[in-house]
Image (cartoon, rainbow, N blue to C red):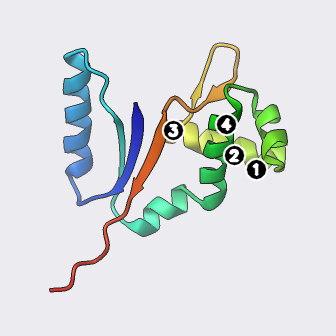
């Protein structure tokens, strides 16, 4: 399963959520979709540091936030803040032992360019 992060028109996030729910009811494993209304909003949430953190976490596997901060060579407090936000966005999961992980094989970020009329 992969995560698809995109910039899309208003209302398309609701359609995407309905499609994911319908697929899960059918027993299929749909890709996770996360939509933002603008590239500015997307990149304010998915900063380069957070994308790097996802990459590091995917590489090292499930671990504590402290171990992730050490692996990423970043300040624990900043990593904790980023992990919390990425967890809220659905891009990181936490298991019963409190370890965090990226449940996706890949994360794709789709940003359409403005069309010239």
Residue 47: name its quadrant.
bottom right
Q: Which residue is mark 1?
A: 78
Which numbered dot is residue 91? 3
Report if the CB atoms under discs 1 and 2 are less than 8 Å apart.
Answer: yes
Q: Nearer the viewer, residue 11 or 63?
A: 63
Earlier in the chain: of badge 3 and badge 2, it is: 2
Please tell me whether mark 3 sits on a helix, a strand or a loop: loop
Label 4 neighbour load within 10 Å: few <14, some 14-19, many 20+: few
Q: Residue furthest bottom?
A: 117
* Picture layout, residue 65 above or below residue 48: above
Report if the CB atoms under discs 4 and 2 are less than 8 Å apart.
Answer: no
* Picture layout, residue 117 above or below residue 94: below
Q: Which residue is mark 4?
A: 59
Tell me the CA gap for discs 3 and 2.
Answer: 14 Å
Report if the CB atoms under discs 3 and 2 are less than 8 Å apart.
Answer: no
Earlier in the chain: of badge 3 and badge 4, it is: 4
Tell me the CA gap for discs 4 and 2.
Answer: 20 Å
Q: Residue 6 location, x and y as percent? A: 35, 55
Which numbered dot is residue 81? 2
Give the residue drawn at x 20%, y 85%.
Answer: 116
């Amino acid at each position: 399963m992969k995560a698809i992060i995109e910039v899309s028109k208003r209302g398309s996030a609701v359609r995407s959520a309905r499609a994911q729910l319908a697929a899960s009811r059918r027993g299929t494993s749909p890709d996770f979709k996360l939509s933002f209304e603008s590239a500015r909003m997307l990149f304010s949430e998915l900063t380069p540091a957070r994308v790097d953190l996802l990459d590091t976490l995917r590489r090292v596997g499930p671990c504590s936030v402290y171990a992730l901060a050490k692996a990423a060579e970043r300040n624990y407090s900043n990593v904790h803040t980023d992990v919390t936000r990425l967890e809220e966005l659905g891009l990181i999961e936490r298991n019963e032992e409190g370890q965090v992980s990226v449940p996706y094989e890949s994360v794709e970020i789709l940003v359409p360019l403005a069309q010239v009329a």
